[in-house]
Image (cartoon, helix red, strand yellow):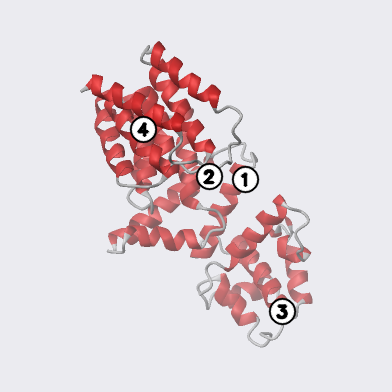
Amino acid sequence: MDNDRRALYNSLRMHWQNNSDLEVEPWQVEDYRALSLETLFQRLNALGVKLDKNGFLAYAANVDSPEELSDTFTAHQEDNADTVDQIYLITFELWRRLLPENRSLSIFCDELDYQIDAFDHGKLTNLEPLEDVLGSLEQILDEYSDEGEDPRQIFGVISSCCANDVESFLYDFIALQIDNENYPYASELLDDFLPFVEDPKWFLFLRARLANATDGEEAEQISKQVLEMALESKDLDFHLEVLAFFAKSADENMFLKLALHTIPLMQVEEDVRDVLLACVDYFHFRDRDEDEGAVHQLLSKRAAIPLEQPFEAGDLHLQDLVELLKRVAKRRA
């Protein structure tokens, strides 16, 4: 069953909204939610499917999803792909409205996409619909997990049926809850989704951020786990995010260990800048004025280097930074 079929058109519409020069047919990117039932049935009839509401519901009673129903309507039109897809998009919208109790996987994922897109574009004046669909997502995951299915595989299947990157959205949304000091909801979301996500280290990092704001003792323990995951990984983006966090919050040795581990992973000048700025914060928040000044000097010397310029492993400035961090680590030992 083509559970990702609606997602493909959602993705096309999203790209078109970001780039209006994209060559598309109007029907491919239309907002079908904005059309009246009368208009939807008129278009369906014009495409050769002669039905009213009662007839539509009668056909729908014999299938389990809008994809199956659309296939029924287009069984003899396979030679015209555009017509087949137009019928599918209209059928999907009619199913979504007329059969709210029969929510197939594709219908659910479409709603998830809709709420994520509305949130990302600042169109949600009330977060309750988004919170509701995230609650439903957690329930679906739990139900399949209780039946013995692999948790991350389940999440992967659902994500593949969405136009948005659901895992990235969840990370950003939970991070926003922490930034806004909505700690109970952030904790609830982490409890709900951490067992399912493909890349749990990022969500463990969010738990460390949350614990740092709410529970100092737990923060140290979780930060140690985050450090271990970082040291086992070559994910530079993760290193840089964690390093910036450790600069202001973690045990001094944890920052130093991660910084020395991050430097060999750097690829371009922007990475160098991020590491140096993290070191500035590290020394600043610990009142190490002399060491902070030394890093500022390194930043000044590199100010003219383009951020996209590749980083040279033998860079003398970075050798100076490594020696500085090693001296500090030795003093801490």
Tell me what residue is drawn at x 60 percent, y 79 percent: 71
Left or right: residue 164 versus residue 292 is right
Kindly state the secondary structure of the residue where label 3 is placed: loop
Residue where numbered disc 4 is placed: 259
How much space separates mark 4 and mark 3, taking CA atoms? 64 Å
User: As rendered, which of 162 and 308 lies closer to the eye?
Assistant: 308
Q: Nearer the viewer, mark 4 or mark 3?
A: 4
Q: Earlier in the sequence, mark 2 or mark 3?
A: 3
Q: Residue furthest bottom?
A: 76
Question: Do the residues under discs 2 and 3 have CB atoms within 8 angstroms?
Answer: no
Tell me what residue is drawn at x 73 percent, y 53 percent: 19
Q: In the rendering, at what x and y percent does residue 320 appear?
A: 40, 27
Q: Amino acid at mark 2?
A: Leu
Q: In the rendering, at what x and y percent does residue 17 appear?
A: 71, 52
Q: In the rendering, at what x and y percent does residue 286 appear?
A: 36, 15
Question: Do the residues under discs 2 and 1 have CB atoms within 8 angstroms?
Answer: yes
How much space separates mark 1 and mark 4, taking CA atoms? 38 Å
Q: Nearer the viewer, mark 2 or mark 3?
A: 2
Residue where numbered disc 2 is placed: 130
| Number of other residues with Cα within 10 Å of mark 1, as a class: few under 14, some 14 to 19, many 20 or more | some
User: As rendered, which of 331 and 204 lies closer to the eye?
Assistant: 331
User: As rendered, which of 87 and 327 lies closer to the eye?
Assistant: 327
For the question of whether residue 120 can be seen, the reply is yes
Q: Amino acid at mark 4?
A: Ala
Q: Amino acid at mark 1?
A: Ala
The label shown at residue 49 is: 3
Q: Earlier in the sequence, mark 2 or mark 1?
A: 1
For the question of whether residue 251 can be seen, the reply is no
Residue where numbered disc 1 is placed: 118
Give the answer, above or below, for where 186 lies relative to 280: below
How much space separates mark 3 and mark 1, taking CA atoms? 32 Å
Q: Nearer the viewer, mark 2 or mark 1?
A: 1
